[in-house]
């Protein structure tokens, strides 16, 4: 019996090794070796993007889509700066750098909140920010900046595109975007592939002073966030004032039981009297 057990274990190990060697989605090379053209060199407060694709922004387009610009301060900018500071304090105190942004249901404004938070974080000169579109069913981050058909996460997963070929600098210093591009119906399964896990693990560890902000699907429309939660440090929940029901919020909160929740952002609030809040 002992010989049979040893033979079965040996066969199982050989089969696992063969599967790993022939896997089309997993590479054991570090991303630095795969993507030598990627250049994000943090030099104190200056960052050089010599190889990363750059976008020429249209300020009018961004204003129309409510993307915050480096203009005169206003209550909305102040609100995002307060949110930024509170998040940075939590991340630094715990040694974290990867935050997922989600919502109970679609329409809460989680993607716009992710974008404006990323811009606010990038203005803080002590770190760089990588905004990743992991809402693989409805990727939309890059559409706030351009109508160009740019490659993204889907091309990295299916077409073996290099990371350097899909990263975008939106002409905002210290901010890089990893678009989503094509959508997946099996999004949670794609998030769990070895190549995707390898990518996020590398992005979290390559630069210790970089914050990874992940725009993810709504909690109550699929299991993407729960499936991907082992690979992130914390979760921020965006709810819609006047839109998110108590039942949806309660269900979302219960689903996140046991996860590290940074907090809840009340979006689309009407706080004109006090000058605080978000849109």
Image (spheres, rainbow, N blue to C red):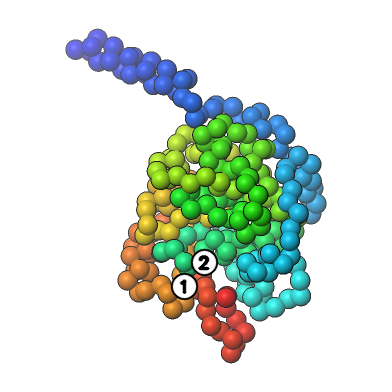
Q: Do the residues labelled 1 and 2 touch (CB within 8 Å)?
A: yes
Q: Helix, strand or loop at disc 1?
A: strand
User: What residue is shown with label 1?
Assistant: 240
Relative horizontal placement of residue 96, taking residue 125 as reference (left or right) = left
Left or right relative to 13: residue 49: right
Q: Residue 229 carries which label?
A: none
* Nearer to me, 137 or 236: 137
- How many numbered markers are drawn? 2
- Please tell me in which quadrant of the rendered image residue 117 appears: bottom right
The Cα atoms of the two marked residues, 1 and 2, are separated by: 7 Å
Mark 2 Cα shell of 10 Å, populated few (<14), some (14-19), many (≥20): some
Question: In this figure, which residue is indicated by the disc labeled 2?
Answer: 109
Q: Residue furthest left?
A: 1
Q: Is residue 20 found left or right of 82 in the rendered image?
A: left
Measuring from the top left, give residue 221's x and y in whole percent.
37, 57
In what element is the residue under mark 2? loop
Q: Where is residue 199 in the image (x, y as percent from the top left)?
A: 55, 38
- Camera-nearest residue between 154 and 42: 154
**How dense is the environment of label 1, judged by Cα within 10 Å: few (below 14), some, or many (20 and up)?**
many
Of 13 and 68, the residue lying toward us: 68
Q: Which residue is drawn at 55% across and 32% down?
A: 159
Q: Considering depth in this image, is 238 or 52 the residue closer to the camera?
A: 52
Give the residue drawn at x 43%, y 52%: 225
């Amino acid at each position: 019996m002992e010989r049979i057990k040893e033979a079965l274990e040996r066969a199982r190990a050989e089969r696992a090794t063969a599967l790993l060697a022939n896997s089309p989605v997993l590479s054991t090379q570090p991303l630095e070796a795969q993507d030598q053209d990627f250049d994000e060199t943090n030099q104190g407060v200056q960052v050089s993007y010599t190889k990363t694709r750059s976008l020429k922004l249209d300020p009018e387009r961004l204003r129309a889509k409510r993307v915050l610009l480096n203009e005169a301060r206003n209550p909305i900018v102040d609100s995002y700066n307060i949110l930024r500071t509170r998040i940075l304090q939590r991340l630094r105190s715990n040694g974290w750098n990867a935050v997922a942004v989600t919502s109970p249901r679609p329409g809460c404004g989680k993607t716009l909140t992710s974008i404006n938070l990323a811009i606010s974080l990038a203005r803080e000169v002590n770190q760089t920010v990588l905004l990743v579109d992991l809402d693989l069913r409805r990727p939309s981050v890059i559409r706030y900046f351009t109508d160009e058909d740019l490659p993204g996460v889907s091309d990295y997963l299916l077409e073996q595109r290099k990371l350097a070929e899909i990263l975008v600098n939106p002409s905002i210093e210290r901010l890089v975007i990893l678009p989503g591009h094509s959508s997946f119906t099996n999004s949670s399964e794609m998030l769990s592939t070895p190549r995707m896990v390898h990518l996020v693990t590398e992005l979290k560890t390559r630069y210790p002073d970089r914050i990874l902000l992940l725009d993810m699907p709504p909690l109550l429309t699929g299991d993407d966030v729960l499936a991907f939660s082992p690979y992130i440090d914390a979760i921020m929940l965006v709810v819609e004032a006047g839109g998110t029901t108590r039942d949806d919020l309660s269900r979302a909160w219960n689903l996140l039981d046991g996860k590290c929740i940074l907090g809840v952002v009340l979006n689309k609030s009407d706080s004109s009297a006090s000058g605080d809040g978000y849109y």
